[in-house]
Structures are given as structure tokens and as C-alpha cells.
Image (cartoon, helix red, strand yellow):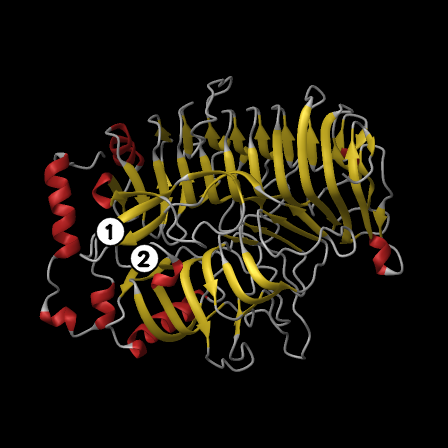
């Protein structure tokens, strides 16, 4: 049923009335109730510095207790801080979005700590610490959190789909946790962008990491695949030992839009300006350039009342959409047909198509933004879950690209799901900034015939750029790139764990499917920091190569890594790229389970540039 919708002027007044109405005395007596009394819904807490720190801490602690190990639950939360100073230490669990509401990170100062730990794992491993967001605040780590942090250290132990953006850490940043016996817990991250760390960054056990347009006092170590794009004070590019890949400038970027509040209490969404050949954080020398869009130009979706008809009606009127925390089940595709439309998630919301259609389809228009969303496959198989541009899209969007930020596309995990392709990019000049496309290897609804998906990503558009592509466990090629002029900065991929038998996992007569496949017709493609891993858990499966690309002079790959994580005896990745590079398989010593290739161009290994 379509929601009744007043005319735009009346609706704007209604929004403002809810946002700015005086809080009743009974509510004001409860700071927590005051914090979530906005149009943003009951799972969004908007704190100000005048609220008692003990009450803010109580709310944050109660949410953490619910969410610490809540890996596949439907609950979602956002903790938002108005500009000011807070003496506060708290922890962040699953599906929790912590953000400052200032124009710059230093507008919100948290003196104490903001911690992501891995204590819910018996070994202190952060390998499954997914789906949370920390952005747009400064933290001075002064609090001693027993067994987790010491003064001067902020610990954020995360893996995929847990982006860190626009942070100012006034101390050391550690990206791992300790196990109960003093062991370093494993982690498989991760992403840091537009941030400043005054001290050093200690990744320790992080297997891979992408840092973009950030800076720090120092960077301590690498494991398999550390990529730095547009950063300052970055380590030297010494791949493979240590495994650092350094790209001096970010060719095209617009930082992720974010919610702000002005001195009068009015909410808006700030959209940073487009940058080219950028280096360093956007706010290092002053306020990030860009424009603010008032919240009354957004349709504020609430999971308890939203449906596809109502959201599509708002989109057709020219509204942007702000998805508040929750799970949205959609019986139709959300259709974005107007240029510059923003779909922004608050509190890591999830969208699930229920009728076998895509969740989101974008026309071949300029400047669309999709940010901060999870898209889950539904029970009826969808051809794609997110489609950018119709097949055959050819319009030039170089002056105003479409951007994806912090997008998770997943099949299975919370429940069984089915789709052919996770993300299909048909339009030209699309830019993605931290995308994880995941066929679940654990959780509910997991099995070769239970959560099937052919490919995570198919790119048909030309001149597509991706920073941080995490894509894994799909049943054929993980990535299929058909467009010209593609660029990828940091690729992390695990092949499927649950191949049923080697003979059924064949690409024609070739054993297995490469993870990263560039079509034979492509003449121009470039990628930096590609890591492909295998764990053939059930059968001794083999993949002939991790990467397949054409032997064209304009196809260039920099810093390639393959890893045999574990698996049945006889399983392997035979080559790194095409017929080049040694295999990875069970071996002793374990160091021999890794292979690297520094440069590959025109169909053969190349000297370093």
C-alpha cells in the first residue's frame, strides 16, 4: 500500500516540527529518551555534550551487550554525537554506527576511548568483526579499558565491512585484539579513509588493509597485502617484503556524504566535493569543501512503515532517501531515475528483495550516491541485487560519477538467499569506495545449493574505479570485468570453501574458476594489490589460476599474492596469473604456502615501474 504523502511544503514543516519540538518534561528527565526522540527513529540516539556522560555510557553499554556477538540479527543502531566534548569510553558491536555530527572530525571530541574488541571470540580473533561504522569524530584515548586498551591507544579490531572514515585518533591506533593467552588474534580487514592518526598505526595480524587519503605518525607492519592510495607519511612500496603497495595519488574521489547538525539543531547531509589526484585527508588544511543538503529534501525511511511503493514515490518526486536503522523487505525494486540522487544508510540498515527482483536499479544518469547499506539476497533468486545502469548503458559520466560507499552485498548469513550476480555495473565512470560482496561461508542458509550465486561483481561499463574490492566465495568467477579502462586498488578474495567435487567446478576444460577474470576482449585494465586465497574445505579442488587476464599491453597488474589458507590435501591454486607463478598448496614450512608476483603486463612478468 502506498503511504499517504502530504505536499512537500507541509511535509517539510512536519519534519521540522518533530525535529525541533520542545522535549516534554517527563522525557527530559530521561536523557536516553531525549536522545532518541527525533524523526530518525527509536534506534538512533543523538547525544549532546550537556547530557550526563554516565547516561550516554549506559546507553552505549546496553547496546553493546545486545550487539557484541549479534552477527546475523535484525537489530540496528546509530549513536550520533552533536559537536562538543565528551568524557566517555565505550565499545562498539555489530550493526552499530558511531558518528559525529560536525562538519569536521574535530568538532566532536571524545576523551576516553571508542573500542572494538574481539572478546566474544574464544581466541580473540577479529576475523568475523564485520558490519559496523565509525566516522567523523576525534578520540583522545585516555581510558584504561582492562585487557583491551591502555591510555594512548585506541583498539579497533575489525575485518571486512567495518569502515573507518574521517577519524582523528589522538594517539596510537591498533587494528587487532589479544587472545586470552596473550596471543595476537587474527584479523582480516579492512579500510581507513580520510583520517589522521597522531601516533602510529599497528595492524599486527591484519592480513590485508586499504588506507586511502589518510596520514599517521608511523605505520608498523604488513602481513600479506597492505595498500596505500593518496596517503601521506606512507611506508615505502617494498612489496613483497614487507607487502606494501603505494599509489601516490587518488585519481578520482568524492568523500562519503555524512549527516550533520547546525548550531540551530537542524539536520542535513553534507556532500563533499569531487577531487582528482587527491593526496591526504580532505580536512587536513581546513573544512572539507562541498555542499549541505537540508534533511527536508530527504525521504526518511523507517523500517516499521516503509515499503517499496512509498520509497519509489519519494524518488519519483526528486527526494533523496535516508534509511534509518533496521531491515527493509522490498517487494519491488527501488528505482533511481534522477541524477544526483542519494541513498544513504544510517545505522547499517539492510535491504532485502522478496520477489526475485533487484533491490536497487539505477538509470544511466549522473552523480548517484549509494552509501552505508547492506543488500541481502532474498528467498526468490534475483538476477542481480544491485544494478548500476541498464545493460548497454553508454552515457559519459566523467564529470559527475556515480559513487558507491560502504556497500555490503551478501547471499546467505542471516537466512537462505539466492541470486546470480551481486553487483552489476553497466554505467561508465562509476567509482566504488569499500565494497564487500559476500556469499556467506557461515551463518544460516549456507550450502552449495542453499545460497547459490554465480558471480559477485560483473563490470560492463568503461572507466570504472574501485578502492577496496572484497569479493568472495561465489560459485564461479568472483569478479568478471568486461569494461575498458577499469582500475582496482586493493582486491581481497577467497575462493568458495564448499566446492562439492572437483569435476563439477570447471570452467570449460580448465580446473576451477579464477577469482579475478578480465575478459579476453579488454585492452586496458590496471590493478594494484591483488590478494587471492583458497580454503578448499570439503574436496581437493584445484583452481588453474587465481587471475585470468588477456595478453594485451594495456593490461597491467601490480603486486599479486596467492595464499593457501587451509584445505584438503591435494587442493591448490596452480598459478598466480594465467600460466605464470608458482602454486600454493599444503606444504612445509608454512611460508611456502604463499606466492607473489611483483609486476605483470602484456601477458608476462614485468620489471617494477
Please give the count of numbered marks on the rendered protein: 2
Q: Secondary structure at mark 2?
A: loop
Q: Nearer the viewer, residue 573 or 329?
A: 573
Residue 38, quarter of the rendered image: bottom left
Residue 148, quarter of the rendered image: bottom right
Residue 136 in picture, x, y percent from top left: 40, 57
Q: Residue at x 40, y 40 (%)?
A: 273
Q: Residue furthest front?
A: 285
Q: Residue at x 80, y 47 (%)?
A: 596
As drawn, is 236 to the left or to the right of 39? right
Q: Secondary structure at mark 1?
A: strand
Q: CA distance from mark 1 to mark 2?
A: 9 Å
Residue 363 in picture, x, y percent from top left: 40, 24
* Rendered-image quadrant of the C terminus: top right
Q: Which residue is mark 1?
A: 267
Disc number placed over residue 557 in the picture, else none: none
Q: Could you tell which of marks 1 and 2 lies nearer the N-terminus? A: 2
Q: Which residue is mark 2?
A: 101
Residue 374 in picture, x, y percent from top left: 45, 46
Amino acid at each position: 500500500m502506498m503511504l499517504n504523502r502530504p505536499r512537500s511544503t507541509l511535509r517539510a514543516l512536519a519534519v521540522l516540527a518533530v525535529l525541533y519540538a520542545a522535549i516534554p518534561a517527563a522525557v527530559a528527565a530521561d536523557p536516553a529518551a531525549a536522545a532518541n526522540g527525533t524523526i530518525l527513529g527509536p534506534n538512533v540516539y543523538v547525544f549532546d555534550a550537556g547530557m550526563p556522560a554516565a547516561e550516554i555510557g549506559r546507553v552505549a553499554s546496553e547496546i553493546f551487550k545486545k550487539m557484541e556477538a549479534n552477527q546475523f540479527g535484525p537489530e540496528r543502531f546509530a549513536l550520533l554525537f552533536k559537536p562538543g566534548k565528551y568524557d566517555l569510553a565505550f565499545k562498539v558491536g555489530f550493526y552499530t554506527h558511531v558518528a559525529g555530527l560536525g562538519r569536521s572530525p574535530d568538532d566532536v571530541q571524545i576523551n576516553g576511548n571508542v573500542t572494538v574488541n574481539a572478546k566474544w571470540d574464544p581466541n580473540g580473533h577479529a576475523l568475523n568483526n564485520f558490519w559496523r561504522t565509525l566516522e567523523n569524530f576525534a578520540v583522545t584515548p585516555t581510558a584504561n579499558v582492562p585487557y583491551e586498551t591502555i591510555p594512548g591507544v585506541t583498539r579497533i579490531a575489525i575485518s571486512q565491512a567495518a569502515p573507518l572514515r574521517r577519524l582523528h585518533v589522538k594517539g596510537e591506533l591498533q587494528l587487532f585484539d589479544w587472545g586470552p593467552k596473550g596471543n595476537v588474534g587474527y584479523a582480516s580487514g579492512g579500510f581507513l579513509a580520510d583520517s589522521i592518526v597522531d601516533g602510529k598505526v599497528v595492524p599486527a595480524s591484519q592480513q590485508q588493509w586499504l588506507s586511502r587519503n589518510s596520514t599517521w605518525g608511523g605505520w608498523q607492519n604488513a602481513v600479506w597485502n597492505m595498500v596505500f592510495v593518496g596517503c601521506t607519511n606512507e611506508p615505502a612500496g617494498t612489496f613483497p617484503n614487507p607487502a606494501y603497495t603505494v599509489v601516490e595519488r587518488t585519481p578520482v574521489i568524492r568523500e562519503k556524504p555524512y549527516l550533520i547538525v547546525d548550531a540551530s539543531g537542524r539536520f542535513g547531509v553534507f556532500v563533499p566535493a569531487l577531487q582528482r589526484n587527491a593526496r591526504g585527508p580532505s580536512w587536513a588544511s581546513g573544512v572539507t569543501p562541498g555542499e549541505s543538503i537540508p534533511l527536508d529534501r530527504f525521504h526518511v525511511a523507517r523500517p516499521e512503515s516503509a515499503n517499496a511503493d512509498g520509497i519509489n514515490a519519494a524518488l519519483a518526486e526528486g527526494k533523496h532517501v535516508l534509511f534509518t536503522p533496521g531491515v527493509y523487505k522490498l517487494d519491488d525494486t527501488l528505482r533511481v531515475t534522477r541524477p544526483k540522487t542519494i541513498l544513504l544508510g544510517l545505522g547499517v540498515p539492510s535491504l532485502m528483495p522478496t520477489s526475485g527482483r533487484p533491490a536497487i536499479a539505477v538509470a544511466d544518469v549522473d552523480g548517484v550516491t549509494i552509501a552505508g547499506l547492506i543488500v541481502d539476497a532474498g528467498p526468490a533468486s534475483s538476477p542481480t541485487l544491485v544494478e548500476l545502469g541498464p545493460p548497454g548503458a553508454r552515457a559519459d559520466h566523467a564529470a559527475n560519477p556515480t559513487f558507491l560507499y560502504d556497500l555490503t552485498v551478501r547471499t546467505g548469513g542471516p537466512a537462505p538467499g539466492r541470486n546470480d550476480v551481486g553487483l552489476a555495473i553497466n554505467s561508465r565512470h562509476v567509482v566504488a569506495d569499500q565494497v564487500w560482496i559476500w556469499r556467506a561461508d557461515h551463518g544460516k542458509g549456507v550450502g552449495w545449493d542453499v545460497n547459490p550465486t554465480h558471480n559477485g561483481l560483473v563490470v560492463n561499463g568503461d572507466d570504472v574505479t574501485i578502492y577496496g574490492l572484497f569479493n568472495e566465495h561465489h560459485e564461479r568467477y568472483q569478479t568478471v570485468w568486461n569494461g575498458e579502462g577499469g582500475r582496482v586498488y586493493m582486491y581481497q578474495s577467497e575462493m568458495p570453501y564448499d566446492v562439492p567435487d572437483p569435476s563439477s567446478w570447471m570452467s570449460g576444460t580448465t580446473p576451477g574458476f579464477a577469482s579475478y577474470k578480465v575478459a579476453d576482449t579488454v585492452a586496458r585494465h590496471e590493478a594494484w594489490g591483488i590478494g587471492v586465497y583458497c580454503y578448499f574445505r570439503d574436496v581437493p579442488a584445484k583452481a588453474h589460476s587465481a587471475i585470468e587476464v588477456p595478453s594485451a599491453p594495456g593490461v597491467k597488474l601490480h603486486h599479486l599474492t596467492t595464499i593457501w589458507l587451509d584445505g584438503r590435501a591435494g587442493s591448490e591454486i596452480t598459478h598466480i596469473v594465467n600460466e605464470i607463478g608458482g602454486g600454493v598448496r599444503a606444504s612445509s614450512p608454512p611460508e611456502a604456502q604463499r606466492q607473489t608476483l611483483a609486476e605483470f603486463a602484456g601477458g608476462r612478468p614485468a620489471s617494477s615501474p
